Image: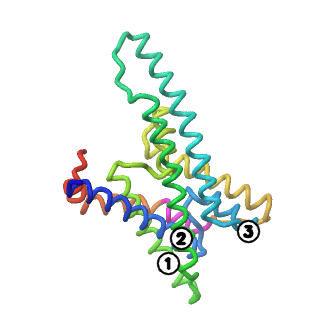
Amino acid sequence: MKKSSTLRVIFYVVGLLVLALGIILNTKSGLGVSPIISVSYSISTIWNFNFGNMTFVLYTVFVIVEIILHTIWNHREAAKESAALKPAARKSLPLILGMDLLQLPLSLIFTRFMNLFSAWIPAPSHGFASQLLVLAGGIICTGIGAAMSLNMRIIPNPGDGIVQAIADFIHKPVGFTKNCFDLFNICITISVGMIFAHKLVGVGIGTVVAVLGVGRVIALFNHFFMKKMTEAAGVEY
């Protein structure tokens, strides 16, 4: 294997591990979790389910939705090209769906590391200041991990994959779609908490800070390191 290919895999795997660590640190802060996993967190907390396992279930739902959207989108675009007598410029549907399905074993491994980090890392016990430090660490790790794994362009995390699939389907920018999807997840989490626990579960100041902070960390990390990393890994942009 070429050195660049090896580095690409290393950067990708390290990115996923750092992302898993960031998610767990976010939950351990006790100030609210990131929107993308708030639904699985609230369900696991209310009914005492394993958080990693519930996140895997959530990611499986994301992948199923991706497959449905990609199938409909592919057929719709094929019909447009046929009507316009244009040559096909799309990836083949089997290739797209194959990449979607590969997210399932990735998610299984990813959520096992979430369980591992959750068992190793204790919740902060020294008041609000320590909670804020853990939250900051979670946001930084989440942003760095997401940037590293996404920049390698291998298999997306289902949380990112479904946003891209929805953005393609509705022909809207990824950033706009991400904000809407985050809001959708927060609304579901609030509803689940209020209906079944009669209180907010998983949604708090940390959720708001995560929405604002993770994107900034990704942008800052990419500003300083993206070009060097992608060149070393042989990834073209």
Mark 2 touching mark 3, by CB under 8 A? no
- The residue where tag 3 is placed is 48
Quadrant of the rendering where the N terminus is positioned: bottom left
Most frequent secondary structure within the magenta stretch: helix
Q: Earlier in the sequence, mark 2 or mark 3?
A: 2
Q: Is residue 70 left or right of residue 49?
A: left
Q: Residue at x 47, y 80 (%)?
A: 133
Crowd band around label 3 with a 10 angstrom C-alpha radius: few (<14), some (14–19), many (20+): few
Q: For the residue labelled by badge 1, is the local secondary structure a helix, a strand or a loop?
A: helix
Residue for badge 1: 134
Instruction: Look at label 2 and name its amino acid.
Output: Ile
Decide: few, some or many residues near mark 2? Use Cα within 10 Å; few <14, some 14-19, many ≥20.
Answer: many
Q: Is residue 188 magenta?
A: no
Which residue type carries mark 1? Answer: Val
The label nearer to you, 1 versus 3, is: 3
User: What is the distance, in whole Å, between disc 1 and disc 2 at their CAs?
Assistant: 10 Å
Q: Nearer the viewer, residue 35 or 70?
A: 70
Q: Which residues are magenta?
A: 204-211
Q: Which residue is mark 2?
A: 24
Q: Is residue 237 above or below residue 144?
A: above
